[in-house]
Image (tube, grey):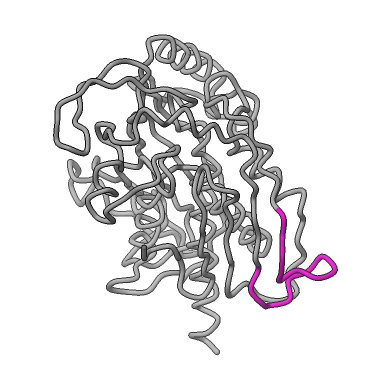
Amino acid sequence: MAGNSFGTIFKVTTFGESHGKAIGGIIDGCPSGVEIDLEAIQNELNRRKPGQSRIVTQRKEPDTVEFLSGIFEGKTTGTSIGFVIENTNQKSKDYGHIKDVYRPSHADYTYDQKYGNRDYRGGGRSSARETACRVVAGAVAKQFLTSIQFQAYVSSVGKIQLEETDAIDFAEIEKNPVRCPNAEKASEMETYIKQIRKEGDTVGGVVSCVIKNVPVGLGEPVFDKLHAQLGKAMLSINAVKGFEYGSGFEGAQMRGSEHNDHFNEDGSTKTNFSGGVQGGISNGMDIHFKVAFKPVATLMQKQETINSQGEKVEMEGKGRHDPCVVPRAVPIVEAMAALVIADFLLINRTTKA
C-alpha cells in the first residue's frame, strides 16, 4: 500500500490499523533545537480521542503517545522523530459480522477489490483511528510555528449551522462537546446528534478553520499552490467530501467588482474574499477555509448490501461508532493545516538559502 506519507520537507509517515497492536508514525525534516512540550501534544490527542463525551464513539482509548527517537533533553535533534500509540481497547469480535459483507459507502468494497483482502476489524487501515498519528505530527509542527495560530471549530451539523448574525466566541469551543463557538447553537447541535444516535443513524457537518499570522509568501505557483496543498491535506481526512477557501462556491455567484480585495497602503486588504491566498501564495491575511464531512457509513440500523460473493444481504452495524465525526475532527483539521504551513515555511528557507 502506497500513500502513507504526507509532506515534502516536513514529512510524516503513519502506520498501523484500528485493531492492531499499535498505530504510530515517523516525522522527518523537523528542525533541530525545537523545544517539545509533551503535555501540549497529549492535550491535542485528548481532544481527538474516543470516549470523551456521550455524542462520540464510546471506545475507551487513553491515546498516550510514546516518543521513541528524535527528541533529547526536551528538544528535537534534527533526526527522525518516531512515536507509537498503543491500541488498548479493541473489540474485534464486534466486526465479525462484516467479514464477508460490504458496508454501503464504506471502504470495505474498494479495499477488497484493490488488495484482494482487507482487515475488517474496525476498518483496519481505513479507520479514522489513523488520524491520531496526524494529530501528533501536527502538534509537533505547531511547536515551531509559535507565532501562527490555528483555530478550527464546528460551524454546522446537518442543517443546523452558524449564521452570519450568530456571535462567535472561540473561548466557547472547548466548553461544549460539539466544539461550536456559539453556546446556543452548540446546545442545539448536541441535542440533534443525540437524537440521531438514538435512531441508529448518523449525520455530517462542517468544520471551519482560520489560520492567523501567516507570513506573506508561502506556497509555490502552478501545482504546489498553498490552497491546493491545504485542499489535499483536508481531503485526505476520513469522511471529508468537500473543501473550500475564502469566498468558496459563493464567490462563483459574485461579480468581480464585488469580489476583488482592494489593498490598504500596508499591503493588507480591505476585504478577504481571497481567504488569505492569491495566486497560490499567502498574502499575509488570515487564511479561512471550510471542510465538509459526510455522515458516518456504519449505521445501527438495517441496510441492504452485498457480500463478497455478490449476493444481496441485509446487515446492521454493531460495535462503537461516531454518530457525527465533526466534533472529533476539529483537532485533525488543525493538525493537517499545521503540517502544510510547516512544510511551506521550510521550503521557503531552502529556497532563500
Residue plotted at (63% across, 73% down): 80
Left or right: 256 in relation to 195: left
Camera-nearest residue between 36 and 167: 36
From this view, report whether residue 47 is shown above or below residue 275: above
Camera-nearest residue between 254 and 309: 309
Camera-nearest residue between 344 and 276: 344
Left or right: 63 in relation to 55: right
Left or right: 85 in relation to 123: right
Q: Quadrant of residue 181?
A: top right
Residue plotted at (24% across, 42% down): 109
Q: Quadrant of residue 192?
A: top left
Q: Position of residue 49 (x, y in %)?
A: 60, 37
Q: Position of residue 196 (x, y in %)?
A: 40, 14
Residue plotted at (43% across, 15% down): 197
Q: Quadrant of the C terminus?
A: bottom right
Q: Position of residue 68 (x, y in %)?
A: 72, 64
Q: Position of residue 216 (x, y in %)?
A: 48, 68
Q: Quadrant of the N terminus?
A: bottom left
Q: Which residues are magenta?
A: 66-81
From this view, report whether residue 137 is shown above or below residue 320: below
Residue 259 magenta:
no
